[in-house]
Image (cartoon, grey):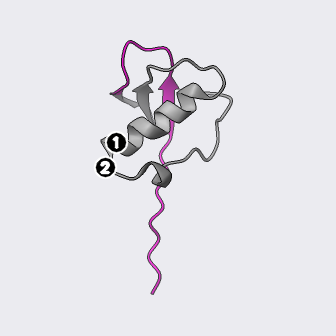
Amino acid sequence: MSVSKNCRLEIKAVPNAARSEVVGWLGDALKVRIKAPSVDGKANIELCRFLAKELNLPKSAVSLATGTSAR
């Protein structure tokens, strides 16, 4: 029997925050403030790093499925 270890979470990312933090739910999406600017993918990289740390997962376990160019 195969067990899927995938989880998809809709996130509303807000770049250029004073610090990276989970704000709470915004409808069906989890609102996350990210310290990094939305330039050259820096906010996306920081979002994945931050979520991996918060979820106690390896960095390689967190990735973006969509939205690499939008919140």
Q: Which of 8 and 55 is in front in this view?
A: 55
Looking at the rendered image, the quarter that the C terminus falls into is: top right
Q: In this view, does 6 lie above or below 11?
A: below
Image location (x, y in percent) of residue 43: 54, 26
Residue at (42, 28) in percent of width and height: 32
Residues tagged 1 and 2 counted as in contact (Cβ below 8 A): yes
**Residue 62 lies in the magenta stretch:** no
Position of residue 33 in the picture relative to residue 66 (left or right): left
Location of residue 28 by image quarter: top left
Residue at (44, 38) in percent of width and height: 49
Mark 2: few, some, or many residues within 10 Å (few <14, many ≥20)? few
Q: Nearer the viewer, residue 27 or 21?
A: 21
Location of residue 52 by image quarter: top left
Label 1 belongs to which residue?
53
Give the amino acid at mark 1.
Answer: Lys
Secondary structure of residue under mark 1: helix
Give the amino acid at mark 2.
Answer: Asn
Q: Is residue 43 above or below residue 1?
A: above
Residue at (54, 47) in percent of width and height: 63
Position of residue 12 in the picture relative to residue 54 (left or right): right
Residue at (48, 31) in percent of width and height: 46
Image location (x, y in percent) of residue 31: 42, 28
Image location (x, y in percent) of residue 21: 34, 26
Query: Residues under labels 1 and 2: Cα distance?
Result: 5 Å
Looking at the rendered image, the quarter that the N terminus falls into is: bottom left
- Magenta segment, which residues? 1-22
Q: Is the magenta stretch mostly helix, strand or loop?
A: loop
Q: Is residue 44 above or below residue 16?
A: below
- Residue 56 circle label: 2
Mark 1: few, some, or many residues within 10 Å (few <14, many ≥20)? few
Secondary structure of residue under mark 2: loop
